[in-house]
Every structure is written in C-alpha cells, then in structure tokens.
Amino acid sequence: MQWYALFVKTGQEEVMRKFLETLLPDADMRILIPKRKLQERRMGKVYEKIRTLLPGYVLIKTEMDVSFYYQLKQMPGLLSILRDETEPMSIPEHEIAVILALTNHGDVIELSEVYKEGDKIKVSKGPMEGLEGIIESYDHRKKRLKIRLELLGQVKKVDLGAELVHKQV
C-alpha cells in the first residue's frame, strides 16, 4: 500500500472523505486530511480553531490499480490525482513520515511553541517534537508562526500555533 494525493476544491476535503467512505466502502484505504490547531484572538478573547494544513489535498493510503484509479476518477468533487506522465505518483515514505509525525498519526496538529524569527529551530514539545525548520515570521499577538519545512518534496511554509521550541546551534 502506498500514499497518494488527491486534489479537491479547497474547503471540500471533508466532503471528499465522506464520498470515499460512502462510495468505496469495501476499499482497503486510509484517509488523512492533516489539520492544525490554532489560537485566534477576536475582540480580546482567545479562541482555538482547527484549520486544514494542506488546503485542497486529501491523502489516501491504498493499493492503486487501474480499476481503483478509475473508480476514484468518478468521484464527485475530485479535481485530479497527483501523477507523473504515465501513472498516479505515490508519495515517498520519508515525506509522508513528516506529515504523520506532525499529526501524531491522527488528523490534528496540536499547538507548539516558538522562539524567534529567522532562527533554526527544533521543536522540543508536542506532536512535532524533533522536527527542524526555520521560523519565517512570528505573530506575537496571535501566537502563530510560519515555519519553513520540507514537505512533499518541496519547501513549504507551515502556519502553526506557537508554544515551545529551542534554537539549533
């Protein structure tokens, strides 16, 4: 079984999960829609929100044969499947391991702490423990930061809630 990325309309990730579970109930697959928990401040109050980490992506782990591929292509709301020139392209294990570590093998990334902008950091607490990145920006008021990490073979900026990291020497 391999991991594959499905492209859907942004905001329709959970709808696609329901379609997959309903229309392909016998399929041997795991569905992952990574999300992150954030703190937002409105009118002086702090609220926790859960937002999608990779908007427009639904990750599935399955055996992708020709029959299953064409069943997926019939799904309402599916824009495309990540592929190379000839066939659906699986996500390498080392790249999906980062996402699974972020989500702690669930769906939601819990709050993490920050240090300061521009520094190399290593998260020392929470589900991202052990991951390294560079802090791009930090919003002190909202307690949110953007970290530059390598995800899915590309350098991505990940917007996360902030709690505890330490500087890399």
Image (cartoon, grey):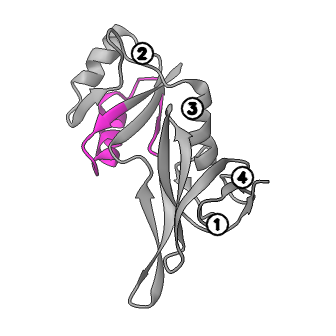
**Where, quadrant-wise, is the C terminus in this rendering?**
bottom right
Residue tagged by mark 2? 64
- The earlier-in-sequence mark between 3 and 2 is 2
Of labels 3 and 2, the one closer to you: 3
Gap between marks 4 and 3, in whole Å? 16 Å
How far across and how far down the image is residue 85, in percent? 32, 11
| Cβ atoms at labels 1 and 2 below 8 Å apart | no
In magenta, the rendered stretch is: 6-33
Residue tagged by mark 1? 114
- The earlier-in-sequence mark between 1 and 2 is 2
**What's under tag 2, amino acid-wise?**
Met
- The earlier-in-sequence mark between 1 and 4 is 1
Q: Secondary structure at mark 4?
A: loop
- The earlier-in-sequence mark between 1 and 3 is 3
Residue tagged by mark 3? 95
Q: Decide which of 148, 5 is in the foreground and name it.
A: 148
**What's under tag 4, amino acid-wise?**
Glu
| Cβ atoms at labels 2 and 4 below 8 Å apart | no
Of labels 1 and 3, the one closer to you: 1
Q: Is residue 127 left or right of residue 12?
A: right
Gap between marks 1 and 2, in whole Å? 39 Å
